[in-house]
Amino acid sequence: MTDDVGRTAEDLLGAYRNRQPIEPVADRFADAPLSLAYEIALAQVEDWVKHGDTIKGHKVGLASRAIQRQMGVSQPDFGHLTASMFHLENAPIPTGTFIQPRIEPEVAFVLGKPLRGPGVTIADAAAAVDFVLPSLEIVDSRIRDWAIGIFDTVADNASSGGVVLGSRPTRLTDVDLRLTGVNLHVNGELIATGAGGAVLGSPLNALVWLANTVGPLGVTLEPGHVVLPGSMTKAVPISPGDTIVADFAGIGSVTALLEGPR
């Protein structure tokens, strides 16, 4: 099984390098526990770090009912965010780095204190957050046609792709994340709306879930790290040349510019 984990991780790493999707990997691991999918993901993260990338945070995926219905799953998952995934707002993002990207608006947490589960409470999570930022996550799948189940997306580092952070920090005491609404525009057209309450009842609940899930694995959420708690809307397909804007009530806006076709 260890050999199968290594080969699958290599296949997914190859998909990153070649920008060519692969067939779903779950069929290789019939009846295997989800922990094995996380081993596959971690093997990729270790390879990225070995070659000079650095871990800058984590993401919670599949946190809203809209996303779960869209993906046909019933539980959240998590992935790692590395430095190479972060892109500056209003700077063209190379589209050649993605295979089949989609966009998700999220309220990003920036931690001021460490968080490590189990046993993390809402109070612990709120006390650990330094500030929040408006953000757009570019999700991508190395699995052909997004034909994923929970095992596939976990093995694929929770379908991570890229992150664009806005530049206006907001303190938690200045906003009620449950009631925060978002309007998502692509090329000036309103594509989707949502609210923070769609993310496990509150994005803070997703932060608690993450800390208590990764803690037993020996992972601490570190000060300065970014945590993406999950999308407030369904994931929307995007294309080269698109301009995406997410406006968050009380938090501000963030803009992602995709480089045009060549």
Image: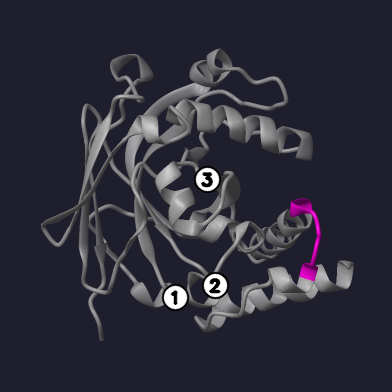
- The label on residue 250 is none
From this view, report whether residue 53 is shown above or below residue 200: below
How far across and how far down the image is residue 167, in percent? 28, 39
Residue 202: which quarter of the image? Answer: top left
From this view, report whether residue 228 is shown above or below residue 250: below
Q: Identify which amino acid the numbered label 2 is placed on.
A: Arg
Quickly name the residue at label 3: 59
Quickly name the residue at label 2: 142
Q: Identify which amino acid the numbered label 1 is placed on.
A: Ile
Which residues make up the magenta segment? 29-35
From this view, report whether residue 235 is shown above or below residue 76: below
Quickly name the residue at label 1: 99
Cα distance in 3D space between marks 1 and 2? 7 Å
Q: Identify which amino acid the numbered label 3 is placed on.
A: Lys
User: In terms of secondary structure, where does tag 1 sit?
Assistant: loop
**Numbered circles on residues, count:** 3
Residue at x-position 48% and y-position 39%: 226
Q: In the image, 105: left or right of 144?
A: left
Q: Nearer the viewer, residue 203 or 98?
A: 203
